[in-house]
Amino acid sequence: MANSSRVQRVADQIQKEMAGLIQSEMKDPRIGMVTVTAVDISRDLAVADLFITRLGENSAEEKKQTVQILDQASGFLRSRLARLVKLRLVPQLRFHYDESIERGRYLSSLIDEAVSKDRQHPGTEEN
C-alpha cells in the first residue's frame, strides 16, 4: 500500500499549493475567497478532482460561475503547479463545488430547531 500513501501525499501537496495559487495568481474578482477543501487524485496521478468552497453565502449561479472560471483557468493553474511540485506528470485539474459545509450547516440548523422545539415542551422529556 505504499502506492496509496504516495497518492495521498501528492493530493495533500496539490491541495496546499493550489490553495495558495488560487489566492495569489488568480486576478478575476468574481472568484472571491476560495478554499480548496479536498483533492481526490487518480491512482496513476493523471487526474485531480479539486473540491472548493467560497467564503460567505453564495447563490447557485455564483457557485457554478466560480467552478467555470477555475475550469477555464485550469491550464494556467496546472502550469503554475508544475513549477511547485516535482512530478513527472502534473495531473489534469477538475474543479467541483463542495456542498458538504453548507449541508452541515443546514443539518446543524435542523438539529438546533428540533432541540428548541423540545425545550418548549418540558413535559415530554424522558428520565
Image (cartoon, rainbow, N blue to C red):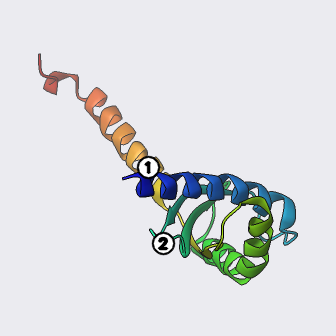
The answer to whether any part of residue 98 appears in the image is yes
Left of 83 or right of it: where is 68?
A: left
Residue type (three-letter) at the residue carrying disc 1 = Gly
Left of 40 or right of it: where is 19?
A: right
Residue 85 lies in quadrant: bottom right
CA distance for labels 2 and 1: 32 Å
Q: Which mark is residue 44?
A: 2
Q: Which mark is residue 73?
A: none
94 shown above or below 81: below
Residue type (three-letter) at the residue carrying disc 2 = Asp
Q: Which mark is residue 104?
A: 1
Where residue 95 appears, as percent x and y from the top left, is 59, 73
The answer to whether any part of residue 102 appears in the image is no
Check disc 1: other Cα within 10 Å, few if <14, some if 14-19, many if 20+.
Answer: few
Left of 20 or right of it: where is 61?
A: left
Please tell me whether mark 2 sits on a helix, a strand or a loop.
loop
- Point out the image quarter for the C terminus: top left
Q: Identify which residue, 22 or 4, lies in the foreground.
A: 4
Where residue 90 appears, as percent x and y from the top left, is 66, 72
Left of 8 or right of it: where is 115?
A: left
Residue 81 lies in quadrant: bottom right
Residue at 68% in and 73% down:
66
100 shown above or below 50: above
Where residue 4 appears, as percent x and y from the top left, is 42, 56
Q: Identify which residue, 87 or 55, lies in the foreground.
A: 87
Residue at 72% in and 83% down:
72
Residue at 50% in and 54% down:
6
